[in-house]
Structure formats: structure tokens, C-alpha cells
């Protein structure tokens, strides 16, 4: 049974239901851990439990979609480590912490995949919701009504007759394809323009490229 489960884990992008079977692995059976303290993390994705862990096949290589090292700049330029004052840049362990809190019922956190749907379908971080960067960008056709709906229905902001109250707004953890990708930086830039508090915005700079490079679990996006 363990051999079968490890074979499933070796697949780069699998369904949440398949990865739920990884729970059968005891922590002592996991050779490739996140770090010395974390073997795996259970999160909720679309109402199902998914176990995030690293690929156990130590001969596994990176997903070809993220093996490319060079892209034309602009637009695919290397992003700075800090996007804006007050916006915290985080890594994989911190991302796992936010996902775990959110899956345990902390409704003050929302993990956001800022990529376009074509990329998300190839695989996303379990627990993330998709908000394409175009949806908050007026230059790409996003209108004030639709932006307002996102702010109130998804982010927990309050519209006070044209003024935004962010006191009860969620902490947003945003990512995209990696350190060369401008989709989550674009979302963050627009959020700041709308007055969203910088301390409630977290940026996973490594994005899917680093997530895939470390062999961490992905699920097909919708």
C-alpha cells in the first residue's frame, strides 16, 4: 500500500482525493519533509482535505512548465524582494502556516492565486482561490461595481457610501508563477491603490515555480 501511495505522490499534479490518501503515511515514513519540524500539512480545498507534502521520489525533477529559466523582460522581469512598504514577503513555510490556519477555521485569511485561469488549471496550491490579476485592474476592463463586489464578498471590506472600511478585511496571501511573474504584484499594487492596508497583504514571491521546484503538492485548479 505504501508503495502505491508513493507512486501517486510522484505525480506532479493530482486530484485532492488522491492526495488525501497520503494521510496513510506516518510522519516517520516521510523521508522528504518540509523541514525538521514539518512532515506534511493538511488543508481544505473545495471542501476536501488535501495533504500538502513534498514529492517522495528523490529522483524526481521539476515540472517542465517551470523549468524554463529565461523569459523576455519586459514583461517577465525579476521582481524585487519587497514590493511596497508594509507588504510582507513570505516563503513556503509561512505559506503553509497561513494555509493551515485558514483550513482550521480562521476566516480572517484568504490565499489568492493571482494567475489567469489557463495557468491555474495546470495546478495550484491547495487551499487557494483564484482571483486573476485582471479582475482588480481597471486598465484591463475591471469596473467599479465588480471590484466592489470582490472587496465586500471575498475580502471582507465594507463599503461606507463610497469610502472603504478595512477594519474587518481579511489578510490576503497572494502568489502567481514566481519571482519573474507580475500577476500577483499587479493585484497587490491595485489593492494598495484602493486603500487596502499593507499589513494585511502578504506576498509569496517564489510562487508556483518555487513550490514546484520543492516538489510540494499541487491540485488542479477550477
Image: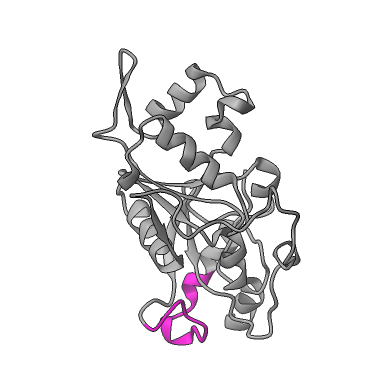
Q: Quadrant of the C terminus?
A: top right
Viewer-nearest residue: 84 or 47:
84
Position in image of residue 88 (x %, y %): 37, 55
Q: Is residue 187 left or right of 171 when viewed as pictured? A: right
Is-magenta flag for residue 29?
yes
Q: Residue at x 69, y 53 (%)?
A: 122
Viewer-nearest residue: 70 or 40:
70
Q: Which residues are magenta?
A: 22-36
Viewer-nearest residue: 97 or 15:
97
Position in image of residue 138 (x %, y %): 56, 25
- Secondary structure mostly seen in the magenta stretch: loop
Q: Splitting the image into 4 quarters, where does residue 197 fall?
A: top left
Point out the residue furthest to the top here: 161
Q: Is residue 155 left or right of 134 when viewed as pictured? A: left
Q: Quadrant of the N terminus?
A: bottom right
Q: Residue at x 69, y 72 (%)?
A: 62
Whether 107 is drawn above or below 15: the answer is above
Q: Residue at x 47, y 80 (%)?
A: 33
Amino acid at each position: 500500500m505504501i508503495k502505491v501511495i508513493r507512486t501517486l505522490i510522484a505525480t506532479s499534479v493530482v486530484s485532492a482525493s488522491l492526495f488525501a490518501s497520503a494521510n496513510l503515511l506516518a510522519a516517520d515514513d516521510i523521508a522528504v519533509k518540509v523541514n525538521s519540524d514539518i512532515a506534511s500539512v493538511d488543508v481544505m480545498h473545495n471542501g476536501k482535505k488535501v495533504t500538502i507534502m513534498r514529492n517522495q521520489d528523490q529522483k524526481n525533477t521539476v515540472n517542465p512548465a517551470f523549468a524554463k529559466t529565461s523569459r523576455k523582460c519586459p514583461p517577465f522581469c525579476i521582481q524585487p524582494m519587497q514590493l511596497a512598504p508594509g507588504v510582507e514577503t513570505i516563503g513556503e513555510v509561512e505559506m503553509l502556516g497561513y494555509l493551515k490556519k485558514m483550513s482550521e477555521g480562521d476566516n480572517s485569511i484568504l490565499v489568492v492565486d493571482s494567475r489567469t485561469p489557463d495557468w491555474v488549471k495546470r495546478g495550484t496550491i491547495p487551499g487557494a482561490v483564484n482571483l486573476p490579476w485582471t479582475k482588480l485592474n481597471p486598465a484591463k476592463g475591471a469596473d467599479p461595481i465588480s471590484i466592489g463586489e470582490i472587496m465586500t464578498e471575498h475580502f471582507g471590506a465594507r463599503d461606507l457610501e463610497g469610502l472603504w472600511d478595512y477594519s474587518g478585511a481579511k489578510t490576503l496571501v497572494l502568489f502567481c508563477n514566481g519571482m519573474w511573474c507580475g500577476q500577483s504584484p499587479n493585484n497587490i499594487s491595485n489593492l494598495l491603490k484602493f486603500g487596502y492596508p499593507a499589513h494585511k497583504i502578504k506576498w509569496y514571491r517564489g510562487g508556483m515555480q518555487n513550490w514546484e521546484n520543492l516538489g510540494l503538492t499541487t491540485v488542479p485548479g477550477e
